[in-house]
């Protein structure tokens, strides 16, 4: 939703009740899901660049996602993980917060 104040556009982000309540939990997990779009190289690149995994660690995660369908890649507060979720989604990865 966009709101206009005195020649200034402000974007307002809305959340569902479930999202607000989920934010109250103390610990959440960022889940990387398997898809048929991204290459191993792209997944490894993103995990290394944005989550600071070594290439070896990122490769192990990519294989886990490939064979098991998903992998927990980060744990933390909802607010922290939401930032990483948005970044990885912009890179085309399929991620969610649990």
Image (cartoon, grey):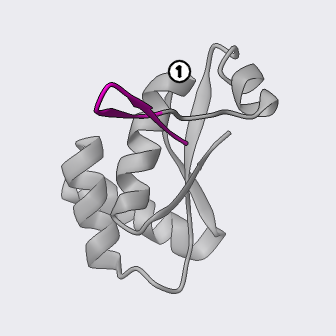
Residue at the image position 29 percent from the left and 31 percent from the top: 8
Between 50 and 44, the one nearer to me in the picture: 50
Residue 87 vs 19, above or below: the answer is below
Q: Where are the magenta residues, as a range?
A: 1-11
Residue sticking out furthest to the front: 6
**Residue 32, percent across and down?**
53, 57
Q: Secondary structure at mark 1?
A: loop
- Which residue appears farthest toward the right when viewing the image? 17
Q: Is residue 33 magenta?
A: no
The residue wearing badge 1 is: 77
Indicate left or right for 33 with 20 as reference.
left
Q: Nearer the viewer, residue 1 or 34?
A: 1
Crowd tier of the residue under label 1, counting other residues whose Cα lies within 10 Å: few below 14, some 14–19, many 20 or above: some
Confirm whether the magenta stretch covers residue 8.
yes
Residue toward you, 32 or 88: 88
Residue 50: give x, y in percent of width and height: 25, 47
Name the main secondary structure of what is drawn in magenta.
Answer: strand
The part of the image, by quadrant, that contains residue 24 is top right
Q: Give left or right: position of 53 versus 12.
A: left
Residue 36 visible in the displayed image = yes
Identify the residue shown where x is 61% and y is 61%.
70
């Amino acid at each position: 939703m966009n709101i206009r104040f005195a020649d200034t556009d402000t974007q307002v982000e809305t959340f569902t009740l479930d999202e607000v309540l989920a934010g109250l939990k103390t610990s959440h997990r960022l889940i990387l899901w398997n898809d048929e779009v991204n290459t191993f190289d792209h997944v490894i690149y993103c995990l290394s660049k944005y989550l600071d995994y070594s290439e070896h660690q990122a490769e192990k995660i990519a294989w886990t996602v490939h064979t098991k369908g998903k992998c927990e890649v980060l744990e933390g507060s909802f607010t922290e993980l939401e930032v990483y979720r948005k970044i990885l989604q912009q890179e085309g990865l399929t991620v969610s917060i649990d």
